[in-house]
Structures are given as structure tokens and as C-alpha cells.
């Protein structure tokens, strides 16, 4: 669906002299990727509203996306496979978050969040950043990318502590879970090599 829309949009941009004809395939590829992301996150927003888990979803995706973007990680073979894996991961994560909110005490939520963040930090320190054909990491930028990723880990830990002091235990857990799943994607990519 997004591919056909990307083709139509690219043709329109070319006809209106915004883009060059010889770069048609490149523009279709990038517009398709952009549209897929827009549709995916719109669907996630609707799901979060439907589940009544908007703050949890925002916390989860803050933790996940900052580490995933800076550390790299597992890539599905197709866009559809990526969407399916992302949806399954999101819904399972929301089920876990709903469950722990009802089953764990504040002390256990704090402990679980800290364990997840320490797990993630250990993986990031050892394996980040992970280069991929879609996102190469030149050797000259590897140390900088690792520092940025570790910086996000520290920020996540500080936000988590702040959330604990404000009794936002489930939001802290959501952030830590997203962070840890991004680190797990990094670990999976490492062992796939």
C-alpha cells in the first residue's frame, strides 16, 4: 500500500519539478520508508488510545527508540516482517506492562526497572553501535555513537529515578522495558552475524 502511494507521490514531485527523474527509484524507496513509519506510529497512537496506555506507550517508545536509533540492532528481512515483529513486540510489551502494574509492588517495579536498565547498559557497553547495510557506522563515528548511546542510557536512568520519586513506577518500568528490548535487538543482531 505505501509503495504504490510512494510511487504516485514521487511521480507528482517529478512532474512538478521538485525531483529529478533519474533518481526516481531512490525517492520511491525513501518516501515508502517514511510513509511506512508514519502509518505505523499512527496505528500505535490509535492502539495506545484504545488501550488507554498513552503515557506508558510514550515512555516505552522513548526508551526503545533512543537506544535502537543509536545502538542499531536486529533488522527484519522485509518491511512487512518488520511491521509484524514491531506490532507483536508492542502488544506483548503492553500486556507485560499491564500485568506488572497489577501484580508487582512499587518495590518490585523499582527493582525490575533497574535490572532492565543495567541489562541494557551492559549490552550497549559491549556491542553498540551495530552497523547494518541499511545503517552503516563508519569506524570514525563508532566511538561517538557509543558515547551518545551510553548518554541515553544515563538519561534513562536519571528519568527512571525521577519517575520513582514522583511515584511514576509504571512509566519508569515502561521506559526500562523499551530500553531493554532495544538492547535485546542489538544482542540478537550481534549473534546473527
Image (tube, rainbow, N blue to C red):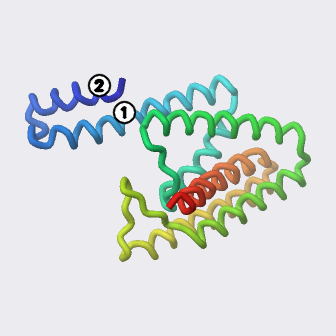
Query: Alpha-carbon neighbours of circle 1 within 10 Å: few (<14), some, or many (≥20)?
Result: some
In the image, 167 versus 3, the foreground residue is 3
- The residue beneath circle 2 is 5
Residue 185 location (% of width, % of height):
58, 53
* Numbered circles on residues, count: 2
Query: What residue is rendered at 88% in x and 50% in y?
Result: 106
* Local SS, label 2: helix
In the image, 93 versus 13, the foreground residue is 93
The answer for how far apart the CA atoms under marks 2 and 1 are is 8 Å
39 sits left or right of 111 in the view? left
Residue 124 location (% of width, % of height):
59, 67
Query: Alpha-carbon neighbours of circle 2 within 10 Å: few (<14), some, or many (≥20)?
Result: some
Query: What residue is rendered at 13% in x and 39% in y?
Result: 19
Residue 35 has which mark?
1
The reply to whether discs 2 and 1 touch (Cβ–Cβ < 8 Å) is yes
- Looking at the rendering, which quadrant does residue 26 occupy? top left
Query: What residue is rendered at 44% in x and 43% in y?
Result: 77
- Looking at the rendering, which quadrant does residue 14 occupy? top left
Tell me which numbered mark, 2 or 1, is placed earlier along the sequence.
2
Residue 184 location (% of width, % of height):
63, 55
- Quarter the N terminus occupies: top left
Residue 12 location (% of width, % of height):
16, 27
In the image, residue 34 sits, relative to residue 119, either above or below, namely: above
In the image, residue 10 sits, relative to residue 177, either above or below, namely: above
79 sits left or right of 49 in the view? left
In the image, residue 5 sits, relative to residue 62, either above or below, namely: above
* Local SS, label 1: helix
Amino acid at each position: 500500500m505505501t509503495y504504490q502511494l510512494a510511487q504516485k507521490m514521487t511521480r507528482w514531485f517529478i512532474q512538478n519539478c521538485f525531483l529529478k527523474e533519474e533518481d526516481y527509484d531512490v525517492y520511491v524507496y525513501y518516501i515508502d520508508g517514511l510513509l511506512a513509519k508514519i502509518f505505523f506510529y499512527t496505528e500505535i497512537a490509535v492502539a495506545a488510545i484504545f488501550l488507554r496506555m498513552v503515557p506508558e506507550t510514550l515512555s516505552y517508545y522513548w526508551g526503545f527508540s533512543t537506544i535502537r536509533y543509536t545502538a542499531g540492532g536486529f533488522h527484519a528481512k522485509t518491511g512487512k516482517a518488520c511491521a509484524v515483529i514491531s506490532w507483536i513486540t508492542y502488544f506483548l510489551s503492553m500486556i507485560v506492562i499491564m500485568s506488572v502494574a497489577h501484580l508487582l509492588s512499587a518495590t518490585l517495579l523499582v527493582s525490575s526497572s533497574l535490572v532492565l536498565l543495567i541489562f541494557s547498559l551492559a549490552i550497549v557497553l559491549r556491542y553498540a553501535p551495530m552497523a547494518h547495510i541499511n545503517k552503516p557506522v563508519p569506524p570514525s563515528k563508532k566511538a561517538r555513537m557509543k558515547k551518545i548511546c551510553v548518554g541515553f542510557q544515563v538519561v534513562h536512568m536519571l528519568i527512571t529515578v525521577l519517575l520513582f520519586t514522583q511515584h511514576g513506577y509504571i512509566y519508569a518500568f515502561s521506559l526500562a522495558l523499551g530500553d531493554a528490548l532495544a538492547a535485546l535487538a542489538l544482542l540478537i543482531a550481534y549473534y546473527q552475524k
